[in-house]
Image (cartoon, helix red, strand yellow):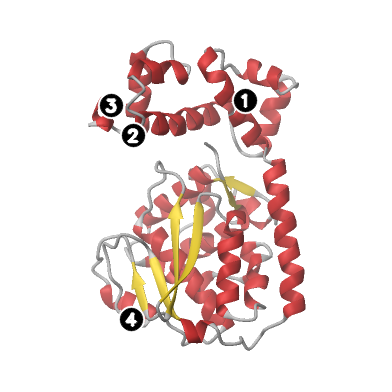
Amino acid sequence: MSNTFLASASRILWRTIRSHGIDPDELFREAGLDPARINEPAARFPVEMARKAWALAASRIDDPCFGIRVGEHWLSTDLHALGYAFLSSTTLMTAINRVVRYNKIVDEVISFDSAIEGDCLVVSYRIARDDLPDIAPHEDARWSTLLSMCRIAKDRDFCPCAVHLMHEKLPCIASYEAFFGCKPRFNQSRSALFFDLETASETLPAVNRELAQINEHALVDYLEQLQEDNFTRKVEKAIAELLPSGDISDDKVAEVLFMSTRTLQRRLSEETRTYKQILESVRHTLAQQYIRDEKLSLNEISYLLGFSEQSSFSRAYKRWTGKSPTEARN
């Protein structure tokens, strides 16, 4: 189903693209994003379109390792109040735990985790949606950005004691070692940075508890508003409930939500979405869930997704995943 990404966080990618001599506005528009919105503090992009911008950047930038340099373009205002809350934290552990707690504001499909393992603070992340696979530059960019934030808060020479990456080893290994200050391990089961626990527990030079608290309150308020105001989610819920009935027109969804079809379309447009995109997204997400339930026949799944015929579902599933439903189950 539809998830969103903080538009201002896309400024990091925008600056990176520009630094490689490519027109970032043109690339963003090609991905379906309005580049003017990256300077609107509360604006959000559909996460699918944000991922498309990353894929386009990876295909245009002649450097497979450009992701580890993305963090150089991070500014504290790119992540709403999270940047200031991070930099004014008492310790790196406190700062990282704020990322764990509030990253949904930045990217609703990425969940960061932190844990103490031996004498290390381990930070990892997971992606909530199977239909949004990671690409190497994006994985690298997440850690590049977080490590750049740590270096600004702590020390510009600060380095992790270990780096685990899920993507395969790339030819520019020297660039990785120079940036991280250690030799990364590739093809790992999880993507993670390992920090010395004692160092992560030291008081930061720019600690400001009052400023951190002010920004944390702003994060809490924004997160609550995000959960309440996302109109796309209301449409998704209505579609999911209507799918088995087969009556999934935008007119019917508008009726369920007590509004005109024109109002439905206008409000979705304000969130840079269309009804067709949301219907496809809901069906795709539910199909991935249903296909793993071997108790459901393909005919039953077709019915649950509002398809009149199994063949229609099969064609749609192959369009989404490149595999037929039968192949996906084998």
Q: Which residue is mark 4?
A: 182
Q: Quadrant of the C terminus?
A: top left
Between disc 1 and disc 4, the foreground one is: 1
Q: Position of residue 167 (x, y in %)?
A: 30, 60
Give left or right: position of 116 versus 170.
Answer: right
Above/below status of 158 relative to 167: below
For marks 4 and 2, give the CA distance. 37 Å
13 lies left or right of 59: right
- Residue 40 in the image, given as x and y percentages of width and height: 69, 54
- The mark nearer the N terminus, 1 or 2, is 1
- The secondary structure type at the circle numbered 3 is loop
Query: How far apart are the alpha carbons under marks 1 and 3?
Result: 27 Å
Q: Residue at left 37%, top 56%?
A: 58
The residue sitting at 35% across, 77% down in the picture is 162
Compare residues 67 and 169 and report the one nearer the observer. Answer: 169
Residue under numbered circle 2: 321
Amino acid type, label 3? Ser
Label 4 and label 3: CA atoms lie apart by 43 Å
| Residue type, mark 4 in image | Cys
Alpha-carbon span between mark 1 and mark 2: 24 Å
Which residue carries the number 1 mark? 238
**Circle nearer the N terminus (1, 3):** 1
- Secondary structure, mark 4, is loop
